[in-house]
Structure formats: structure tokens, C-alpha cells
Image: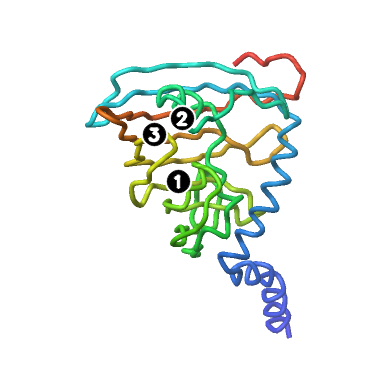
Amino acid sequence: MKLLSLVCWTVFLSAPLLAQAALTADQIIAQVVLQDKKLVERRKAFDYDLDITREKLDASKAVTQTIKEHLVVKGDKRPDYGTRTVTGKPEEEAQKASREEPFELLKMLDHFIFTLEGTEVADGVLCYKIAFKAKDNMPYANREEKVLNAVSGHLWASVKDFSLVKNQGTLMHPVSVAWIFATLLEMEFQFDSMTLPNGDVGPKQVQYRYLVSIPFSSLHERDTRKMSNYRPAGGETVKK
């Protein structure tokens, strides 16, 4: 009788885990999107420091020049870096791109095929590991969407609450971009997270490298954005 009771309790306690394990990649991604919307709203309660590093690279990826910038991001008030133009000069466009939000993959889910590859620990969190690959011949509304239509990679979502913990990808083939006669030859990116003061998962670092071919030259750059010192919006800056 005791053995039967033990078996029953074991089945009862493991049921939620079995239910989660049965989720498909698309079902997990749907939950990631819902959770991400909640966390984006909750992050508006925080100011944070943003350190931007732009590294000019040579053909061997060695750094030839470094440009650094420090910003304070205020709650839900994002900095305005100016309008992205179709004919903007490559260097001006690169400067704007280094400050902008990373590619918003979660807003273009119908452009990708997702495959669940099991679970894995990422940034100290047990996660679902999901591969993504862009579908063929998808439409696009702007340059960012056109680039995302040629990207594949992996993302890691928390098994506990579906928070996006990590995301990385790479360009599958060259893409002509809005700069006149310019082609994006290489691109790779990675997003990593951290635990915020309220216990949420939030952005820690976004890094991407790209190689753009332009007439008579090229633009090879690695941009890193580090977020730190999250504190209540409108409060005093906390010294590190």
C-alpha cells in the first residue's frame, strides 16, 4: 500500500514536468513572446547604464580602432538617434546601428522554422534550447527584416518561466542592404542576460559583428552594448 501511494505521488509531482517536456518548439516560442512582453513593460521601472564599444576590425578580425560611449537610459524613454535613411553614409549608419536595439526576432516569428533540441544551462539558467532558421523567400518591410530573413541560430528560454535568456545567430548568405551598392557579407550576434533587482531576467550584453562591402572599400566592425547598474527609474545613480 505504501509503495502504491509513493508511486501515485511520484506521478502527481512529475506531471507538470512531463507536460512541459511535451511542449513543441512553436508552443515554447509562443510562451517566450508572451513573457517577453511582460518583462519589457516591467523593465520600464528601471534606469540603467549603457556602455557602447565600437571596434573597427581588419581582415583577420584584429582591432584597429576603438570608439567608446557611455549613456544613461531612463526608464521607458529610449534615446533618439535620428532617422535611418535609405541613402545614409555607411559610417553614419554604422554609428546609428551601434546604438539601436538588437534585431527583434520575436516580432517576426512567422519568418522562421523552430526546432527544439532539448534542454541546456545558459547563463546559469536551465533552458529549452531551440534552433531557428529563416524560411525561404519571405517578404520584408525594411532593411532589418531583410537581414533577419537570412539568419539562423539558437535561442535559450527558461524552463521555469519562458524568459529569453540567450540568443545567438549568424548570416547564412550575403544580403544587399539599403546603402547604395552595399552588401552585407558577414554578420553574427549574441544576446546574454542577467538577473535584475526585481528577480526578472533582463539584458546584460548584446554583441554583433558585421562585414559590409561598399564601393572601393568595406566596413568591418564589432559592436558591444553592455547594460549595468539597473536601479529604480528616476532615482539616484548607484555607484559601482
Residue on which disc 2 sits: 87
Where in the figure is residue 5, as x and y percent of width and height?
Answer: 73, 80
Q: Is residue 179 visible?
A: yes
Quadrant where the N terminus sits is bottom right
Residue 42, image quadrant = top right
Q: Is residue 236 above or below residue 116?
A: above
Left or right placement of residue 222 versus residue 50 in this view? left
Foreground mark, 3 or 1? 3
Mark 2: few, some, or many residues within 10 Å (few <14, many ≥20)?
Answer: few
Q: Is residue 158 above or below residue 197?
A: below
Residue drawn where x is 51% and y is 25% of the image:
96
First-in-chain label (2 vs 1): 2
> What residue is shown at x 42% (from left), y 53% (from top)?
152
In the image, what residue type sits under mark 1?
A: Val
Q: Give the percent coordinates (x, y) of residue 183.
A: 34, 40
* Disc 1 residue crowd, few under 14, some 14–19, many 20+, Cα 10 Å: many
**Distance between the alpha carbons at the discs numbered 2 and 3:** 6 Å
The type of residue carrying mark 3 is Ile
Total labels: the figure holds: 3
- Measured in 3D between alpha carbons, the distance from the residue under mark 2 to the one under mark 1, in whole angstroms, is 17 Å
Where does label 1 land, which residue? 147
36, 229: nearer the viewer? 36
Residue 195 spot, x, y in % from top left: 62, 37
